């Protein structure tokens, strides 16, 4: 894997909690934080925000995600170049698992 995405999942009720996590992540030198979407985007079935980090930072990012998820879900996946496998085979969940919309990869 060249890098990883961690997608923070939230909804209207948990949006403010998600924003606090997103602001914390923005202080990390090794993370690039995307847009805090207020709609499902791509294969993600709920609102989400993407955190991008290098494979070399996985050993510090996973503990950070575990400590800071505040009861919300993180969907974490590798970036191998195969989008379907990246969202099915190379995944980890912190919190509740969701069914992704994988049809976009067909």
Image: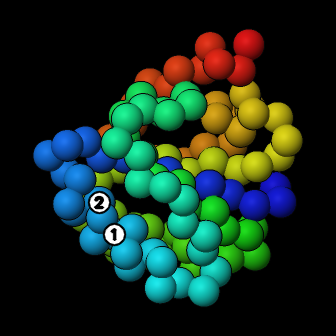
Q: Residue at 64% of width from left, 80% of height from top?
A: 30
In the rendered image, which residue does mark 1 sit on? 21
Q: Quick one: quadrant of the C terminus? A: top right
Q: Residue at 64% of width from left, 31% of height from top?
A: 88
- Counting every numbered tag in the picture gives 2
Q: Residue 94: horizontal and vertical position, in percent?
A: 41, 53
Does residue 95 show up?
no
Query: Looking at the rendering, which quadrant does residue 40 occupy?
Result: top left
In the rendered image, which residue does mark 2 sit on? 18
Nearer the observer, 18 or 61: 18
Residue 73 is labelled as: none
Query: How packed is label 1: few (under 14 Cα within 10 Å), some, or many (20 or more)?
Result: some
Report the side of 12 relative to 92 (left or right). Answer: left
Q: Residue at 39% of width from left, 68% of height from top?
A: 22
Q: In this rendering, is residue 68 above or below 91?
A: below
Nearer the observer, 9 or 58: 9
């Amino acid at each position: 894997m060249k890098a990883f995405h961690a997608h923070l999942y939230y909804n209207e009720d948990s949006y403010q909690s998600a924003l606090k996590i997103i602001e914390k992540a923005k202080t990390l030198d090794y993370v690039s934080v995307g847009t805090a979407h207020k709609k499902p985007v791509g294969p993600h079935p709920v609102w989400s925000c993407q955190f991008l980090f290098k494979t070399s930072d996985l050993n510090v990012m996973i503990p950070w995600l575990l400590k800071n998820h505040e009861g919300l879900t993180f969907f974490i996946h590798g970036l191998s170049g195969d989008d379907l496998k990246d969202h099915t085979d190379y995944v980890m969940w912190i919190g509740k698992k969701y069914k992704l919309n994988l049809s976009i990869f067909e």
